[in-house]
Amino acid sequence: MNKNSLLFLFLVFAQQVFAQTETRVAQSIKGKVINQLTNEAVAYTNIGIEGTFYGTASDADGNFELKIPEEMVNKQIFFSALSYKNDTFPVRTLFEKEFNIIKMEPLTYDIGDVDVAAQSRVLIRILRMASENTPYNFLGGPFNLVCTFGNEKTVDDTVKIVDTAEVLLFDRNGYKQPSKSDAFLMRNYTISKEKPDYSFSTGITNFDELLDLDWVRSGTSVLNPGVVWQFDLTLEDEPEIDGNSCWVISFSQEEPTLAGAQDFYASSFKGKITIAKDDYSVKKIEGSAVSEKHNRQGKSLAVGNSNSNYLEDVAYNFEITYSRLKPEMILLNKKYRFGGKNVEETSRLVVNEVHTTGLEEITSRDYFAD
């Protein structure tokens, strides 16, 4: 990447980026970042509160402003820019002046060595901000989701099976505590078939497989701050969606991990995530993968040596869209071999209604449809 590309990347990130909290602002810190030796402005400096993802960036002229929540006034604020030494100050010391001049000490780097790393750092920070802001951007529990679940399966290009069902989901915590364990323990559901004579009732619904794709709720894959560094990231596009500017970040793993792909046997894994610039809310997640085999109880589980009842030669793609503080639609397309037959399967979950009052509390999961 050349210098212009690098500047462009930082430009998209050079805006005030703080979470939508309910806490009060103690004071705004304003100032300018300059080169200690030349007094020239240092553009697109990363500025943040240590130990958090709360921060901003200086603009093209080195100017910045950051509103400090009351709970952060006793923390340290850092300044970080390419080719400069990092600098850190107590937040309170910057309250003393109406306008602060931050002088950065220059270093010597080979720009060819830092371009890719710089891009990756910015994109990782955007993804971490999206993860950090999930409790503010999505619905907290408890709530019910009234959904329509559809499953369409074609076997050996001849036998076609179509089924639909109504699903009532109860989420005790919602998105205020995103984690894989919380999503599993706090989400339960009932499934009611529209055609009770359909033989699908004797088989696994695979509904959990769709829920597992809601990475915002589970805080997994690229939305897990502890895992995101494992991915190759690229800023792919900056579209306008519903009047909001967004980032589209592509991600991939050359050698997929279980934590990254959520797939025990994946040999290929890539996708895209769309994030709104104004509040870091996730708008869309897309992905595709190829896997040697899948456990029928879930792709994140291993297949035992004595287990012959599993899916083989699996290829799939998925898409999740979000709107109005909740998931809107989850779609999964799969191709695989099972029992010596070729199967193409499409599963879709559409959220029709959200209820936050008059709730029906559900304490178990319908792994089999009634």
Image: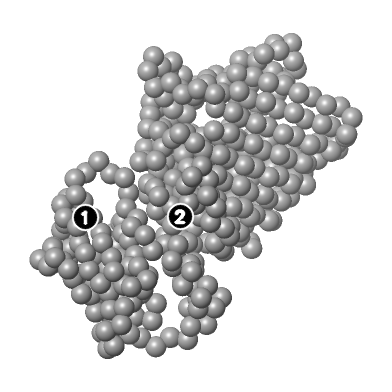
Dot 2: few (<14), some (14–19), or many (≥20) neighbours within 10 Å?
A: many
Rendering coords of residue 45 (x, y %) = 34, 71
Which percent across, then down, holds residue 251?
58, 58
Q: Quadrant of residue 369?
A: top right
Q: How many labels does the image show?
A: 2
Q: Which amino acid does label 2 sit on?
A: Leu
Disc 2: which residue: 127
Instruction: Report helix, strand or loop for mark 2.
Output: helix
Q: Earlier in the sequence, mark 2 or mark 1?
A: 1
Left or right of 12 in this view: 256:
right
Judged from this view, the residue extending furthest toward the top is 197
Location of the N terminus (image quadrant): bottom right
Which quadrant would the C terminus be assigned to in this image? top right
Name which residue lies at 39% across and 14% down.
358
Three-letter amino acid code of the residue under disc 1 = Ile
State whether residue 299 is above or below residue 198: below
Give above or below for 345 relative to 72.
above
Q: Which residue is disc 1 drawn over?
A: 68
Rendered image quadrant of residue 296: top right
- In the drawing, does residue 141 fall left or right of residue 149? left
